[in-house]
Image: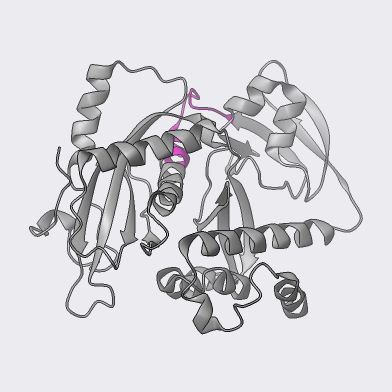
Amino acid sequence: MKRNIQCLFKSYNYNQNITTTLSKRFLSSQDAIDRRHHLFMLEKKRQIENVGRIEKIEINYKGIPKDCTLIMNKDISTPYDCAKHLSEWHADTSALALLDGTVYWDMHKPLTESCSLELQNFNVPEPQQVNKAFWRSCSLVLGACVTAAFKDNVPVKLHSFPGPDIRSGSFIYDVDLPSLPDWKPTQQELHTLSAEYVMLSRKGLPIERLDVSEQLAMEMFVDNEHKSSQIPSIARANGKVTLYKVDKHVDISKGPLIGNTAQIGKLAICSIHKITGSSESDVKQLYRFQGVALPTGVVLNHFAFSIIMERAKKLNSARSPINPFVDTRELQQSIAASA
């Protein structure tokens, strides 16, 4: 494995003047995005090529229009490939797969053995896991939008987003903006960020999953000290780090996530709060970006959605990652964006 990873790094020649770890830490935001994307695609290609002899597996589909058996390729075919065999509607609306009635599976994650398959959309009788995947995906896409929204001379260091909690009223992403210590976002800036989000979601981009080694993950996020510090603890369980890619944006999440960005419907970025760390924290402050969204196909009138937006403007009570022993509701110095 180590030899394969070294070959992978040697094949990466996007920016040959970056020769040391120190210089990689000062990549521009766009260069860092391109570099991670390139390494992600190289590793994905390597994993596919390592499959070797293709074996067939039986996938027993359960659902509409009728139960059937699909013969698919082990470690290559995904639930999304199965959905395409059924209909375009199945492929477009399926957010998660349920294997053998117990395991929730990403739509773009290769299947590893014969199993039963149910496709989960947002209208299933028990939508808890689908809703969590939707909320988690919204945070991931928010990170992509924040990175793209700022000019290249403004460093954007994504920190993390907490596990989904629908009762909190908003999905969030905590971001380090070291060159903007006293930023007070305007309403126009929130609208611009919302528009960036809408444009990305309307592209209908697949949200792809890839499990990589700790060493490769560290190389991919060498420019981001927050992600680099999180990776060893994430990889402690099995030596792997789960990554997701939407467009060129690559980020860390345990998943599962929904199938594609077109499944995110009506949305708004509602507020940005400043949260502060303790005196012992390496990072003294982060900005908490908060938004709210509905799945595509869920209809809600403007007045009802405005009520949800008002709730989403309030500081989300998820614990601060830079001061985890203090509830953010107690941080009186937090600065909310103007309503």
Is 213 covered by the magenta stretch?
no
Q: Position of residue 209 (x, y in %)?
A: 61, 51
Q: With respect to residue 102, does 75 lie above or below?
A: below
Is 125 covered by the magenta stretch?
yes
Q: Is residue 138 visible?
A: yes
Q: Is residue 90 left or right of residue 178?
A: right
Q: With respect to residue 134, does 325 lie above or below?
A: below
- Please identify the residue farthest to the right as the structure is shown: 53
Residue drawn 25% across and 63% down? 180
Q: Is residue 23 left or right of residue 5?
A: left
Task: Give the color scheme: rainbow, by chain, secondary structure or one colour.
Answer: one colour
Q: Nearer the viewer, residue 335 or 109?
A: 335
Q: Position of residue 191 (x, y in %)?
A: 30, 36
Q: Is residue 270 visible?
A: no
Q: Nearer the viewer, residue 307 or 122?
A: 307
Q: Position of residue 125 (x, y in %)?
A: 47, 24
Q: Position of residue 294 (x, y in %)?
A: 39, 29
Residue drawn 55% across and 33% down? 203
Residue drawn 53% across and 39% down? 258
- Please identify the residue farthest to the left as the structure is shown: 332
The quarter of the picture where the C terminus appears is top left
Q: With respect to residue 151, does 207 lie above or below?
A: above
Q: Nearer the viewer, residue 153 or 66?
A: 153
The quarter of the picture where the N terminus appears is bottom right
Count of all numbered marks drawn on residues in the image? 0
Q: Is residue 52 left or right of residue 25?
A: right
Residue 174 position by quadrant: bottom left
Q: With respect to residue 189, does 268 lie above or below?
A: above
- Which range of residues does the magenta coloring cover? 120-134
Residue 277 position by quadrant: bottom left
Residue drawn 45% across and 38% down? 134
